Image (spheres, helix red, strand yellow):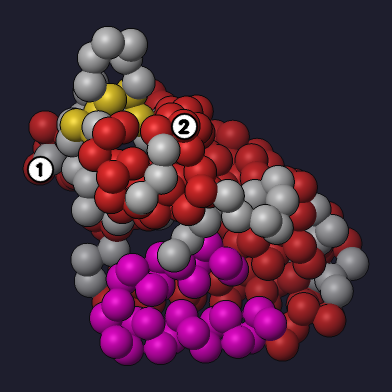
Amino acid sequence: MVALPQASERRTSADVVFEDLYEQIVSLDLLPGTKMSEVEIAKRFGVSRQPVRDAFSRLGNLGLLVIRPQKATVVRHFSLEGIQNARFIRTAVEVEVLRRACRSWDTAFDARIDDNLEAQRAAIAAKDTEAFHQIDYEFHRLLCEAAGASFAFETIAANKAQVDRLCILSLNAAESMETLLQDHIDIMDGLRAGDAAAVDGAIRRHLERLDPTIETIHATHSDYFQD
């Protein structure tokens, strides 16, 4: 299960509910427009309504739920403007993270990165898009850690959540995952060589991969969008 960074290692009931619903929304098990009931969710998890209310609030802050007093809470539809804004912020932050990493790459992370890349290859071979998505998430977290900028991943993850659902729609073929894996390899080659220009080009190219698919997804799944 993919979980956003927690403020504490101790997982509360609200954390459990949040992480489960987050994954269901991102994986499109819960489609845009799906109604959510505090009572039903509390019953499913065997908790009171307060942890569910807290989880809903966190998901709302990520732009994944629309919470309306006295009305049903619903999974938020895609927003083209929101997607573009989130991608702008993520690019700005991640480019700076990798510039820092490139200035002095910490080789202590090589083994963990290589293990992650191998796990990506295994997910592609198994045609497991969900596993690939989760491993991709961990890859970008590791880059922040290696750069000594773990604090930045919270911002990256929050903005990544805005487009993760589109990523699931676009990762419908092994070729798509292979392209992203090659981007990751290019990023790592640049970091290990200390080639700032190559790293900058690779991460920007990587984050722009979704551009050609947004219009197609908007056309084929217009009911998922609010604009």
User: Is 54 situated above or below 20?
Assistant: above
State how far apart marks 2 and 1 are (Cα).
Answer: 38 Å
> Residue extending furthest right?
104
Element on which disc 1 rests: helix
Residue occupying the point 84% across, 81% down: 108
Residue 125 magenta-highlighted: yes
Label 1 packing within 10 angstroms: few (<14), some (14-19), many (20+): few
Find the magenta span and give its range.
112-139
User: Is 24 situated above or below 227?
Assistant: below
Q: Nearer the viewer, residue 138 or 147?
A: 138
Q: Which mark is residue 220?
A: 1
Q: From the viewer's perspective, tell me whether residue 199 is left or right of residue 36.
A: right
The image shows a total of numbered marks equal to 2
Residue occupying the point 24% across, 39% down: 40
Residue 91: x, y in percent? Answer: 59, 43
Q: From the viewer's perspective, tell me whether residue 95 is left or right of residue 123.
A: right
Q: Nearer the viewer, mark 2 or mark 1?
A: 2
Q: From the viewer's perspective, tell me whether residue 6 is left or right of residue 125.
A: right
Residue type, numbered disc 2: Gln
The residue where tag 2 is placed is 50
Give the dominant element type of the magenta stretch: helix, strand or loop. Answer: helix
Q: Earlier in the sequence, mark 2 or mark 1?
A: 2
Residue 107: x, y in percent? Answer: 83, 81
